[in-house]
């Protein structure tokens, strides 16, 4: 596609349930990022994938959070046993070279009730 | 590690007035600097970027920013604001060898008619 695509755009889930958020990066982009944007906060880095290298998971807030990237393209962010504090907009971005600008998707708004 | 400070949480201007949004960064070497804009319900769109060379960079939508190494700043400016500029603005810094952009908390721009 022409841009970064994220699905679903909105997700409401019950506390304690697991959720999966999907990101389709721009075709050919080797780097993929996940960020979290909480109300009134900036963007909090979660995880970074670059090609076939081991991902940088240093931003994941707890072991309930995990992410995969299959075939160097699509990525799935999984949150297990969701908590109310997980409510946020989850943004995915990709780029094709080190230290160039990242292109962002429109985000998934997650609400945990 | 690099960091970004956007000291103004909210800025209110009248339509047609000039605008300056402040951004200060912390990094020991020459940073890569970005300004993004986020309209309500949208992802982040790149306004402009600085990697090297001319310290005054021009971006889209009539925005410009000036890199001042001595002040560790990268302030965003626009000579005449339009109502459609109302949005959230994020400054970000990347660093040589550090592939994960760090974002500020954002500045919310309110434009009065």
Image (cartoon, helix red, strand yellow):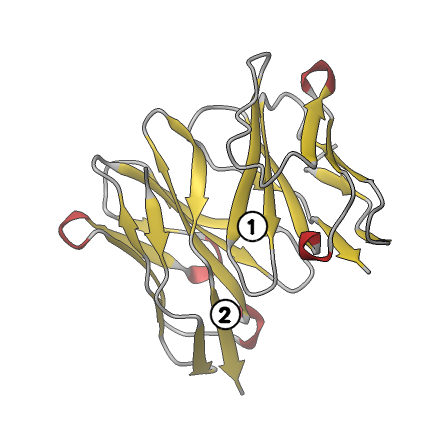
For this orientation, the residue located farthest to the top is A52
Return the residue at label 1: B45
Q: Quadrant of the N terminus of chain B?
A: top left
Kind of element beneath mark 2: strand
Chain at numbered mark 1:
B
Q: Are marks 2 and 1 in contact (CB under 8 Å)?
A: no
Instruction: Please provide percent x and percent y for residue B48.
Output: 42, 48
Instruction: Please provide percent x and percent y for residue A76.
Output: 74, 31
Q: How many numbered callouts?
A: 2
Instruction: Please provide percent x and percent y for residue B58.
Output: 36, 51
Q: How far is disc 2 from disc 1 in space, using C-alphas?
A: 15 Å
Which quadrant would residue A51 be assigned to in this image?
top right
Q: Give neighbour class at mark 1: few <14, some 14-19, many 20+ (Cα, 10 Å).
A: many
Camera-side residue of B73 and B28:
B28
Chain at numbered mark 2:
B
The correct choice, above or below, for A49 with respect to A103 in the image is: above
Which mark sits nearer the N-terminus, 2 or 1?
Answer: 1
Along the horizontal axis of the image, is A53 left or right of B77?
right
Return the residue at label 2: B108
Which quadrant would residue B6 be assigned to in this image?
bottom left
The correct choice, above or below, for B76 with respect to A44 in the image is: below
Q: Quadrant of the C terminus of chain B?
A: bottom right
Instruction: Please provide percent x and percent y for residue A42.
Output: 51, 56
Kind of element beneath mark 1: strand
Marks 2 and 1 share the same chain: yes
Which of pointers 2 and 1 indicates the residue nearer the eye?
2
Q: Give neighbour class at mark 2: few <14, some 14-19, many 20+ (Cα, 10 Å).
A: many
Along the horizontal axis of the image, is B54 left or right of B77?
left
For residue A77, the mark is none
Camera-side residue of A84 and A107:
A84
Q: Residue at x 72, y 14 (%)?
A: A71
Q: Residue at x 58, y 51 (%)?
A: B44
């Amino acid at each position: 596609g022409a841009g970064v695509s994220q699905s679903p755009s909105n997700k409401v889930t019950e506390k304690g349930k697991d959720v999966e958020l999907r990101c389709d990066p721009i075709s050919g982009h080797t780097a993929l990022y996940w960020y979290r944007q909480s109300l009134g906060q900036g963007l909090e880095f979660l995880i970074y994938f670059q090609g076939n290298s081991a991902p940088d998971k240093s931003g994941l807030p707890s072991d309930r959070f995990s992410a995969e990237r299959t075939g160097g393209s699509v990525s799935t962010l999984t949150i297990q046993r969701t908590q109310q504090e997980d409510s946020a907009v989850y943004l995915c971005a990709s780029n094709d070279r080190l230290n160039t600008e990242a292109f962002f998707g429109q985000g998934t708004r997650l609400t945990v009730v | 590690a690099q960091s970004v400070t956007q000291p103004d949480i909210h800025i209110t201007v009248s339509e047609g007035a000039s605008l300056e949004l402040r951004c200060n960064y912390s990094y020991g070497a020459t940073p890569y600097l970005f300004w993004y804009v986020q309209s309500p319900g949208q992802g982040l769109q790149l306004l402009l970027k600085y990697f090297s060379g001319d310290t005054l960079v021009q971006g889209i939508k009539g925005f410009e920013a000036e890199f001042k190494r001595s002040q560790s700043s990268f302030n965003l400016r626009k000579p005449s604001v339009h109502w459609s500029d109302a949005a959230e603005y994020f400054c970000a810094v990347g660093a040589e060898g550090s592939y994960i952009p760090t974002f500020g908390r954002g500045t919310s721009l309110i434009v009065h008619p």
